[in-house]
Amino acid sequence: MNPIDRLLREKIGLDAASVGSSSIERIVRRRMKSLGLKKIEEYQRLLESRSCAQGRDEWEELVESVVVTETWFFRDRDPFTALVQLVRCEWLPQHSTGPLRLLSLPCSSGEEPYSLAMALLDADIPPERFTIDAVDVSARALARAQRGVYGKNSFRGKGLDFRGRYFQAAPDGHALHPRVRDCVQFHRANIFEEQFLAGRAAYDFIFCRNLLIYFDGAAQTRALEKVHRLLAPQGVLFVGPAELPLAIRHGFVSANVPMAFACRRAGEATRPPPVRRERAPRAPKFVAPLMPAASTPISAGKQAQRPAAAGAAPPSQADLAAARQLADAGELAAAAAICQAHLDRQGPSAQAFYLLGLVHDSGGDPQAMDYYRKALYLEPDHFESLLQMSLLLEKNGDSVGARTFKRRAERVQQKP
Ligand SMILES: C[S@@+](CC[C@H](N)C(=O)[O-])C[C@H]1O[C@@H](n2cnc3c(N)ncnc32)[C@H](O)[C@@H]1O
């Protein structure tokens, strides 16, 4: 491993392979050129000399260049709906006083913690009843968060009615209403610092989504230990779609909230009953549009047959919903079996292939990509498959391919 990759892994947990070693190499070359350095060892020495201001500044510059700060409001939607239900059905009845404590880690440029605030305000929970801490290692992302002005990439999917309620048009985007801004306290910190959030009271809900996917196994373990310590005994942790199996391997159990990727600390004496799934009244879930098959076939999808565009019965979604629930609960083999049975019975289905992709992805199986491609062969605009393809390619070091899929996903979102 090259010394800079090693340093990034040690200090911020970054697994170079997750963002592509070649893109880190490019960043390092660019940094060295701007500093007039020829040898990687000289750059390494500079980064390690953190007692001098130049070394510290350069380390920060490097971190800012390598972190992936991609995020948007109400990302994945269901976790926010689940949070509101859990607060209403469990937390409020058990706490007549005192604030509900939430943590968004990492918060990037603020879309996630502000979405938490908007979801709670929409549920008529007054700001004095909750506190939201939001933490990230990136000073630049935090500066954007504190400014609170967002461009179109922060608003994706279809349920954007919250924008009309909580934002005002500004010359360079949409400015968040101070009422929401004031609900969030931002902090700059690296989860691997020894004193990370030391002395804080435990949190009732932690959103730790799309962080572990950038770490190697050892860093995932260290990070999950910290999160475990920060979560109240009856608290709920929300992770990203591919991260639930990791949490379950590290001291958490599924909270059995479909599609929310939520879990609780394992072994707590009283575990509240599972939460029914309901839609949030003013924040409808984004559903990937079912588009007619129209684009160029992709070779890996050869085995998939496109369904007849007209007259074909829509596939039953019930078993796929069950498969999704099982995948969400970390029951990957059972989820895969249901998807396979669905395919055998109903014929090709983009959603079944997508779920199989997700299941294989969670286990780090390269076959995941074939499944996403099959989904996209059937439904070229299958938004979630486009996103997962982009993430997987980035992880495999194919930044150009990743960008292509990301752009396709963005185009899908921009469609009326
Ligand atoms: C893809 S964003 C996720 C944001 C949000 N949670 C979401 O799911 O949309 C990943 C964030 O992790 C932050 N990050 C990476 N390593 C970190 C570390 N060691 N400590 C704290 N934050 C870190 C990055 O700066 C980046 O903003």
Image (cartoon, rainbow, N blue to C red):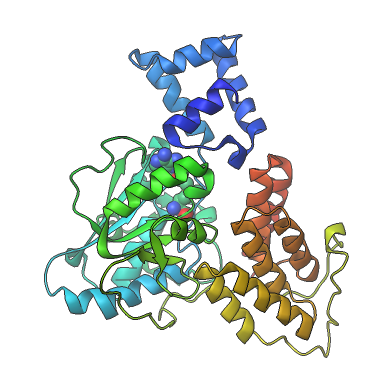
Residue at 80% over, 66% down: 377
Along the line of sight, the residue nearer the viewer: 277 or 212: 212
Q: How many marks?
A: 0
Quadrant for the C terminus in the image? bottom right
The x and y percentages for residue 276 are 41, 83
Position of 152 with respect to 272 (left or right) is right
Q: Farthest residue toward the left?
A: 97
Residue at 45% over, 64% down: 74
The answer, for residue 177, to whether it is visible in the render is yes
Q: Is residue 18 above or below residue 231?
A: above
The x and y percentages for residue 221 are 43, 46
The x and y percentages for residue 415 are 66, 66
Position of 367 with respect to 249 (left or right) is right
The answer, for residue 170, to whether it is visible in the render is no
Along the line of sight, the residue nearer the viewer: 375 or 409: 375
Residue at 35% over, 70% down: 83
The x and y percentages for residue 121 are 29, 70
Position of 196 with respect to 400 (left or right) is left
Task: Please tell me in which quadrant of the rendered image residue 205 appears.
Answer: bottom left
Task: Please tell me in which quadrant of the rendered image residue 113 appears.
Answer: bottom left
Along the line of sight, the residue nearer the viewer: 26 or 335: 335
Residue at 53% over, 75% down: 325
Q: Is residue 71 above or below residue 294?
A: above
State ligand 1's quadrant. Answer: top left
Quadrant for the N terminus in the image? top right
